[in-house]
Amino acid sequence: MIKIAVTGASGRMGQSIIAAAEQNKNVEVEAILNQGDDLKSILNQFDVLIDFTRPEATLEYLHICQQAGKAMVIGTTGFAADDLQTISAAAKNIPIVFAPNMSVGVNLSLKLLDMAAGVIGNEADIEIVETHHRHKVDAPSGTALKMGEVVANALGRDLSKCAVYGREGIEKPRSQETIGFSTIRGGDVVGEHTAYFFMDGERIEITHKASSRLTFANGALRASAWLQGKSNGLYSMQDVLELG
């Protein structure tokens, strides 16, 4: 039985993780934290910290866990490049599962995207569209960016150079080397992502739609159990699901 602590326990994801854990025989919630609570005071109560908060809070938790030798599952998105380097450096001292989306379905979709991009090559115009609830603050979503990264890597492209975020006004014809991103925010949509491969005469769409945050919560719990006995390092859900 893996003992976990959950940050942001009063938030939407925190509540979903706690609810999912009640139905999971492999993990047990031993501690919960909300904004202002002291992580250092409960370090002896858990094996893995699950964090779906904000980048600044996650980095504080990361520093404490690194010092205490506690494993982490990080589902927070919106990190800057320097923050990602900080997470990578911390993983030399503790095991971390870090993924922009913990859903089993999303991670299977990433594998399909890699396959599709490899087969289609440079013959398609590629666009990624994501939709989330009105409260989500980072755009494009971390999942959408991960989808773009997977496709770009499969095609030998640098996403930072080929990504186009939204279009407005009169533009030149679309370059096939680019990967486009479009963002929609509204209502209570949990999360929807579609990658389009547009070709002359046909198109391929790879779509994932989440109707409940429990799908992310269950993935996070699966990652927590998977971390048992793992050596220090930075892991993804692709590792957890053995999709690599």
Image (cartoon, grey):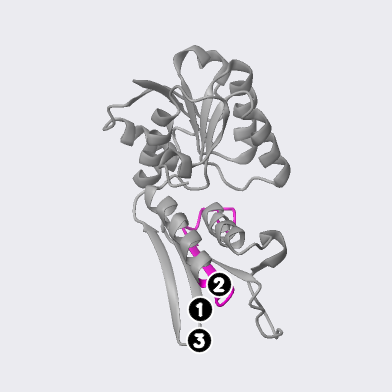
Closer to us: 134 or 144: 144
Q: Residue at x 45, y 14 (%)?
A: 45
**Viewed as shown, does residue 3 lie left or right of 43?**
left
Query: In the image, which residues are magenta?
Result: 120-141
> Cα distance, mark 2 to mark 1?
6 Å
Location of residue 113 with respect to 73 vertically, above or below = below
Residue 162 appears in view: yes
Residue 119 at x, y percent in the picture? 49, 68
Of helix, strand and loop, which one carries label 1?
Answer: strand
Mark 3 touching mark 1, by CB under 8 A?
no
- Mark 3 closeness class: few <14, some 14–19, many ≥20 residues within 10 Å: few
> Cα distance, mark 2 to mark 3?
13 Å
Report the disc number at residue 198.
Answer: 1
Q: Is residue 8 magenta?
A: no
Kindly identify the amino acid type of the residue bearing the numbered disc 1. Phe
Location of residue 170 with respect to 103 vertically, above or below = below
- Mark 2 closeness class: few <14, some 14–19, many ≥20 residues within 10 Å: many
Q: Residue at x 64, y 62 (%)?
A: 156
Residue 137 at x, y percent in the picture? 58, 53
Location of residue 16 with respect to 112 vertically, above or below = above
- Mark 1 closeness class: few <14, some 14–19, many ≥20 residues within 10 Å: some
- Which is nearer the N-term, disc 2 or disc 1? 2
Mark 2 touching mark 3, by CB under 8 A?
no
Residue at the spot of label 2: 126
Q: Is residue 133 magenta?
A: yes
> Cα distance, mark 3 to mark 1?
7 Å
Kindly identify the amino acid type of the residue bearing the numbered disc 2. Ile
Residue at the spot of label 3: 200
